[in-house]
Amino acid sequence: MDFGQALERLRAGERLTREGWNGKGMFIVLQAGYPHGIPINANTAQATGIKQGTVCRFRPYLMMRTVDADFVPWVASQTDILATDWATA
């Protein structure tokens, strides 16, 4: 599928991968964010300078599970956007 179709599937809650990615177990998901806000933890407080426990809203974002099984925010590259090898993970 192409990237437009992939976005539709992400919005529907599916996990997606690319056949062109070399890492095993890698996929992306749509993280819904926290539109009503959550109290930030010590890690976020240290990074932002905002007092721990302050309620902050987080917008939706794409998140990737890496080959090392870690999770990171993800931004599509030009290659990802133009790829037609998107598949359900």
Image: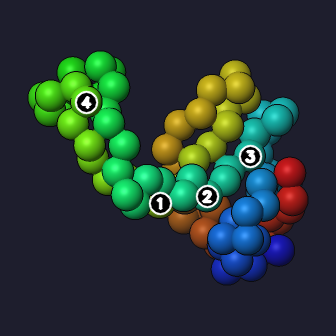
Q: Residue at x 47, y 54 (%)?
A: 33
Q: Where is residue 26 in the image (x, y as percent from the top left)?
A: 75, 39
The label on residue 53 is 4
Q: Which type of secondary structure does the marked residue at label 4 adopt?
A: loop
Which residue bears the numbered disc 2? 30
Q: What residue type is labelled 1?
A: Pro
Q: Is residue 83 visible?
A: no
Indicate which disc residue 36 carries.
Answer: none
Binning the other alpha carbons within 10 Å of mark 2 as few (below 14), some (14 to 19) or many (20 upward) gives many
In terms of depth relative to the viewer, which is nearer, 34 or 65? 34
Badge number at residue 27: 3
Closer to the chain start, of discs 2 and 4, is 2
Q: Measuring 14% from the left and 32% from the top, which residue is drawn there?
A: 50
Q: Are the residues at dot 1 and dot 4 in contact (C-beta closer than 8 Å)? A: no
**Mark 1 Cα-neighbour bin, 10 Å: few <14, some 14–19, many ≥20:** few
In-image side of 19 versus 8 (left or right) = right
The residue that label 1 is drawn on is: 60
Query: First in sequence: mark 2 or mark 1?
Result: 2
